[in-house]
Amino acid sequence: MNGKRKPAAGPYTPDPEQLALMPEVSGNAVNGVGEGRKRRPTPIYHHDPERTPFAALQTWFRARPSHPSIEAARLKRTSIMEEPIAPLTGPRRNAPPEVWSGEVKAKGRELGAQLMGITRVRPEWVFEGYEVSHTWMIMIGVAMDYENLATAPSPRSVVEVVTQYGRGTQVAKRLAGWLRGQGWDAFPHCGPDAGPILLVPAALECGFGELGKHGSIINRDLGSSFRLACVLTDAPLIADDADAFGADGFCVNCLVCSQECPPDAISAQKQLVRGDTKWYVDFDKCVPYFNEKTGCGICIAVCPWSRPGVATNLVNKLARRRRT
Ligand code: B12
């Protein structure tokens, strides 16, 4: 690796300019920490400003001048985001769900995805104030280059994140266009905007992996080094199964991401959030550092599962341990 990640010089203190933009309400309260009842998530970040109490902070982040390489990567991503989606044209092609499911996944991979999966939309994944009328979510995972990511939070790592957002968007748009060309309505979604729906629980549901202590998914091949996108559709499909291989138990004893997080946002214990007990990242601690660095990915970069080749070895080791 050329550009190694520089460790933080000392404890992180958010700059007063950002703290002044924080609303009265805690982001953790907005996210429903401590709530035992299942409910839809509240828009918190990467949404239209009128939908979130963190609008001032988000605007500050978006208006911030960044490294020229990041600006260039953002411009490229914008051109992908502006690409028109192919129109819905008939006649509608009918085929059994197993045929469609296989073809959709093969098409996604042909378009550049490393991971493909299918799950039914669940109402508790749709942000308050948004409606999703489609039945299915086709989940897309695109790998991030580890050598670039490992330099987080450098501009080089941010360029990698922005570039892969663009790639995810491109796969989602072209896959949606392919479905629309065969008469099935399809709506692509990627980032960086949050869009109408949470991507992580949907990707967990269809076999992309397990939720890590750092709040992102750990996949059995790619570790934590990938981004998500999706296509919402009504084409007849079949749901995939979840995939548990021991990452959750591994995270219980691994302290790497929590110790390496400069704002100390990653907690050692799972928390009750909107009715689920799960790993949770402290929003109020994470976001000022994330903003200051124009996007931080230290937690997924230092995750032992992210280093190429390690995930497969760990999966095998954990399986052997379960057998003995
Ligand atoms: C807003 C947002 C942020 C915010 C804060 C989110 C927060 N924790 O409050 C900020 C800007 C700080 C942020 C930072 C990061 N993010 Co972010 N973020 C999003 C976004 C746009 C919306 C998520 C959201 O609103 N969360 C707020 C509430 C709902 O959070 P929560 O209750 O803690 O739930 C989280 C998880 O537990 C899970 N989840 C939700 N419901 C359930 C239910 C169950 C049962 C389980 C197990 C899990 C689960 O999903 C949520 C993801 O934040 C999503 C894209 C999307 N549409 O989903 C990307 C996304 C989650 N981020 C992602 C990533 C990778 C990051 C970063 C590593 C930055 C980077 N360099 O890429 C950091 C990591 C910090 C962290 N884990 O929170 C990826 C995760 C990919 C993956 N492999 O899992 C996503 C999916 C973007 C993408 N398109 O790839 N993010």
Image (spheres, grey):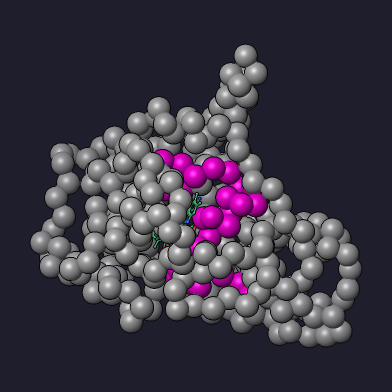
Indicate the quadrant where residue 262 lies.
top left
Confirm whether the magenta stretch covers residue 295. Answer: no
Left or right: where does residue 156 sit relative to residue 175? left
Left or right: where does residue 134 sit relative to residue 29? right
Pick the quarter of the image with the N terminus: top left
Confirm whether the magenta stretch covers residue 188. Answer: yes
Residue at screen point 44% across, 33% down: 251
Residue at screen point 44% across, 74% down: 128
Of 10 and 157, the residue lying toward us: 10
Left or right: where does residue 91 sit relative to residue 17? right
Asked if residue 150 can be seen in this view, the reply is no
Asked if residue 246 can be seen in this view, the reply is yes
Q: Is residue 86 above or below residue 30?
A: below
Residue at screen point 22% across, 66% down: 25
Direction top: furthest residue: 324
Please name the predominant secondary structure of the magenta segment in the image: loop
* Ligand 1 - quadrant of the structure image: bottom left
Bounds of the magenta span? 187-216
Q: Position of residue 318 (x, y in %)?
A: 57, 24
Q: Position of residue 208 (x, y in %)?
A: 61, 47
Q: Is residue 57 above or below residue 300?
A: below
Pick the quarter of the image with the C terminus: top right
Of 159 and 168, the residue lying toward us: 168
Left or right: where does residue 16 sit relative to residue 117? left
Q: Please tell me how many numbered marks the rendered image carries.
A: 0
Indicate the quadrant where residue 254 lies.
top left
Direction front: furthest residue: 37
Residue at screen point 49% across, 78% down: 130
Q: Position of residue 155 (x, y in %)?
A: 34, 54
Of 279 and 227, the residue lying toward us: 279
